[in-house]
Image: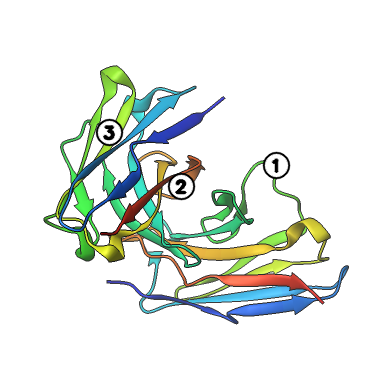
Amino acid sequence: DIVMNQSPDSLAVSLGERATINCKSSQSVLYSSNNKNYLAWYQQKPGQPPKLLIYWASTRESGVPDRFSGSGSGTDFTLTISSLQAEDVAVYYCQQYYSTPYSFGQGTKLEIK
Amino acid sequence: EVQLVESGGGLVQPGGSLRLSCAASGFTLSSYWMHWVRQAPGKGLVWVSRINSDGSSTSYADPVKGRFTISRDNAKNTLYLQMNSLRAEDTAVYYCARDCSTSCWVDYWGQGTLVTVSS
């Protein structure tokens, strides 16, 4: 089974500043036949279901603000929020869909400093 | 508009059973793989199970294997999760979730239904 580990567990960033969340998988989620990383990022606000932000590690879902970006390949990935807005306060999860069980990271709680 | 509406949650004693349902609308259920994901109170997301488009292939997380059964009725636009031999650690909000197509990311989530296992 692939284990996903996020860092940090929590993060406080000032409004307008950059927020960076890391995700590391215990084995590569890069599928060699199509050169795609099977990695997604989700945002979950209190009392709400998760919302898809990024898939294929770096493709932004339609309607997601461009301040959100994903990068990385193989086993190391990053979600970056370029300029933090108040509405970005949430818990962020990475998930691999390379193989079952489709594991999530433990989550990173993002707050305003 | 894609909608996923879960039902069937509630309070059940340890060892008991529940069947969750997820009514899908706004898309053709038979074209999509589907998942169940759970979240214990104050905890993170945990993938539980997935089923392919016609129900011929399923997969489960180890903690629920042999106790939970995922199924679907495409004619009724409904996804199910039969949960048997429930344990306290199964207490969670259970989300129905749509796969983007066939074994990829989750693009839509339901609002979830709370299952509480307690005596």
Q: Earlier in the sequence, mark 3 or mark 2?
A: 3
- Image spot of residue B100 (x, y percent): 44, 41
Name the residue located 64 percent from the left edge and 56 percent from the top edge.
Answer: A45
Name the residue located 63 percent from the left edge and 74 percent from the top edge.
Answer: A21
Q: Dots 3 and 2: beta carbons under 8 Å?
A: no
Subunit that carries the residue with mark 2: B
Which colour scheme appears in the figure?
rainbow
Q: Is residue A81 above or below residue B59?
A: below
Residue that badge 2 annotates: B106
Amino acid type at image mark 1: Gly
Q: Is residue A38 left or right of residue A81?
A: left
Q: Is residue A60 left or right of residue B111?
A: right
Name the residue located 72 percent from the left edge and 63 percent from the top edge.
Answer: A89
Q: Secondary structure at mark 1?
A: loop
Residue that badge 1 annotates: A63
Residue that badge 3 annotates: B53
Subunit that carries the residue with mark 3: B
As drawn, the residue found furthest toward the top would be B75
Categorize mark 3 by other alpha carbons within 10 Å: few (<14), some (14-19), many (20+). some
- Image spot of residue A39 (x, y percent): 47, 61
Q: Is residue A76 above or below residue B1?
A: below
Are labels 2 and 1 on one chain? no
Q: Quadrant of residue B24?
A: top left
Q: Secondary structure at mark 2?
A: strand
